């Protein structure tokens, strides 16, 4: 996704909207112009990118499922010992005097 910021400052524009749109078409990107000053399309830009991420992740999960690959949460469980347990040798603090 390409986000054009400060769309409220049209007189200071370095890249014209049609130029940005055609670039995005060539590169298969979505395009949106925003302005934080007048709150134009700011929330929409976040919603749009989250939606695109969701669709990409969903496609990958579906493809992995079809190929028989393991998905998230389906791997091997690793048990980590509690640091407060009495198992294992005791470590001395780095600055303590040797006893």
Image: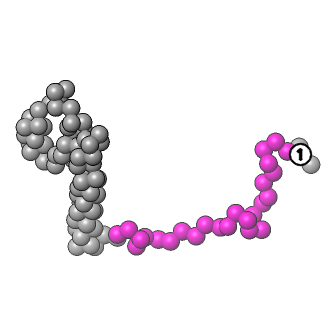
Which of the 4 image quadrants contains residue 10?
top left
Side of 22 relative to 11 (left or right): left
Side of 32 relative to 83 (left or right): left
What residue is disc 1 on? 98
Q: Is residue 99 above or below residue 13?
A: below
Q: Residue at x 19, y 26 (%)?
A: 12
Which of the 4 image quadrants contains residue 11?
top left
Side of 97 relative to 42 (left or right): right
Q: Is residue 97 above or below residue 79?
A: above
Q: Residue at x 50, y 71 (%)?
A: 77
Q: How many marks?
A: 1
Residue numbers of the magenta segment: 71-96
Using the image as rendered, state which of residue 8 and residue 33 is in the foreground. 8
**Residue 87 sits inside the magenta stretch:** yes
**Residue 13 sits inside the magenta stretch:** no
Q: Residue at x 73, y 65 (%)?
A: 84
The secondary element bearing badge 1 is classed as loop
Q: How is the image coloured?
A: one colour
Using the image as rendered, state which of residue 81 and residue 22 is in the foreground. 22
Q: Is residue 3 visible?
A: no
Which of the 4 image quadrants contains residue 86?
bottom right
Residue 52 percent coordinates (x, y): 23, 57
Using the image as rendered, state which of residue 45 and residue 57 is in the foreground. 45
Residue 61 percent coordinates (x, y): 27, 67
Side of 94 relative to 77 (left or right): right
Residue 5 percent coordinates (x, y): 24, 38
Q: Residue at x 78, y 54 (%)?
A: 91
Residue 87 percent coordinates (x, y): 75, 67
Magenta stretch prevailing secondary structure:
loop
Question: Callout 1: few (<14), some (14-19), or many (20+) C-alpha neighbours within 10 Å?
Answer: few
Q: Is residue 13 visible?
A: yes
């Amino acid at each position: 996704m390409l986000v054009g910021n400060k769309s409220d400052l049209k007189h200071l524009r370095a890249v014209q909207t049609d130029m940005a749109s055609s670039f995005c078409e060539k590169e298969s990107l979505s395009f949106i112009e925003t302005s934080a000053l007048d709150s134009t399309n700011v929330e929409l830009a976040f919603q749009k990118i989250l939606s695109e991420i969701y669709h990409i992740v969903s496609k990958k999960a579906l493809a992995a499922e079809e190929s028989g690959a393991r998905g998230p949460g389906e791997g091997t469980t690793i048990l980590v010992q509690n640091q407060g347990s009495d198992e294992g040798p005791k470590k001395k603090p780095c600055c303590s005097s040797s006893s």
